[in-house]
Amino acid sequence: MNVGAGAGSYEPDHLEVTAVEPSATMRAQRPAGAAPAVDAVAEDLPFGDRAFDAALASFTIHQWRDLRGGLREVRRVARGPVVILTCDPAALERSWLTDYAPQMIATEASRYPRIADVRSGLGGTVTVEQLPIPLACVDGFSEAYYGRPEALLDPGARRANSAWSFVSENAVEAFERTLRADLASGAWDGRYGHLRTQPTFDGSLRLIVGRP
Ligand SMILES: C[S@@+](CC[C@H](N)C(=O)[O-])C[C@H]1O[C@@H](n2cnc3c(N)ncnc32)[C@H](O)[C@@H]1O
C-alpha cells in the first residue's frame, strides 16, 4: 500500500500496489497505468488487518490530521515494514536557507512531526536513517537546491515546495533581494560556495522503517 500516494512519484512499478489518496486532484494526476488509487485517508483505511505485505508513506505524514491515528492504521494493515520518507524538523536549520528564508524554514519545521513521535506512533522496532541529498537532486524540495542557490530565485522552483505559500510576500521579496545581492557580491559563495561541488548534503531527509 502506498498511502498519501499523490501522483505516484516513488511508487514501485514492479510490485502490486494499492494507492490511497484522498485528493481527487492528485488522483487525476496519476499517470495511465499507475496502480489504482482508493479515496481514503490514512486515519481510516478501508482494509482488513495485515492486508498488505508492506506500506509506504512518502512526504505525506506531515499533512495528516491525526498522525498517531494514521500510523496506528497503517501499522494495522501492513504485515511487514512500514516505510516513511519525511523530514526531521530539528535538522532543517542545517540549510543555508535558514539565513535567507527563516520564515520558510520555521514554517517547514512546524509542519513536520517530531521523529520521536513517528517512532512511538509506529511502535515495534523502528530504524531512522539519514538520507543524503544528491547535488543534482531532481525532486524540488528546498534542500534539493543546497548547491544551486540560483535555482531558488525562480518562483517556479519555489512553487514545488508548498512551504513557500505560507510565507508573506514581503519575506519572499526580502529573500530574493538578499540572495540575489549576495550571489552578485560573492558573499553567498564566500560562506557556502563549497556546497556547489559537495556531492551530497546531510540535511533533514529521513527514511524511517517500522517493523512489527
Ligand atoms: C506532498 S504529497 C506527496 C505525494 C507522494 N507520496 C510523493 O511522495 O510524491 C502529500 C500527499 O498526501 C496526501 N494526504 C494529505 N492528507 C492525507 C491523509 N490524512 N491521509 C492520506 N493522504 C493524505 C495529499 O493529498 C497529497 O497527495
Image (cartoon, grey):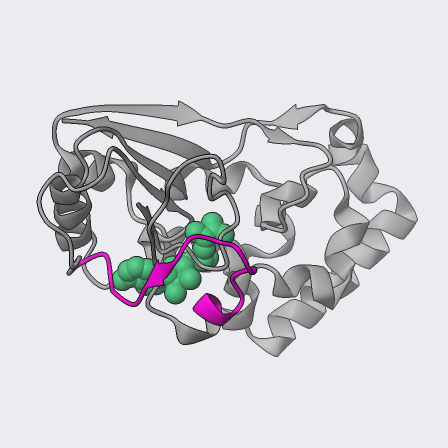
Give the percent coordinates (x, y) of residue 91: 44, 36
Residue 33 or residue 56, whichever sits in front: 33
Q: Residue at x 57, y 48 (%)?
A: 98
The C terminus sits in image quarter: top left
Assess whether residue 35 is covered by the magenta stretch: yes
- Residues in magenta? 26-43
Q: Residue furthest bottom?
A: 169
Residue 62 drawn above or below residue 55: below
Give the percent coordinates (x, y) of residue 10: 50, 43
Residue 179 or residue 62, whichever sits in front: 62
Give the percent coordinates (x, y) of residue 124: 12, 26
196 relative to 126 in the view: left or right: right
Ligand 1 quarter of the rendering:
bottom left
Residue 159 drawn above or below residue 186: below
Q: Residue at x 47, y 67 (%)?
A: 26
Q: Residue at x 62, y 77 (%)?
A: 169
The N terminus sits in image quarter: top left
Secondary structure character of the magenta stretch overall: loop
Answer whether residue 64 is visible to the viewer in this image. Answer: no
Residue 46 drawn above or below residue 14: below
Residue 26 drawn above or below residue 102: below
Assess whether residue 29 is covered by the magenta stretch: yes
Give the percent coordinates (x, y) of residue 167: 54, 70
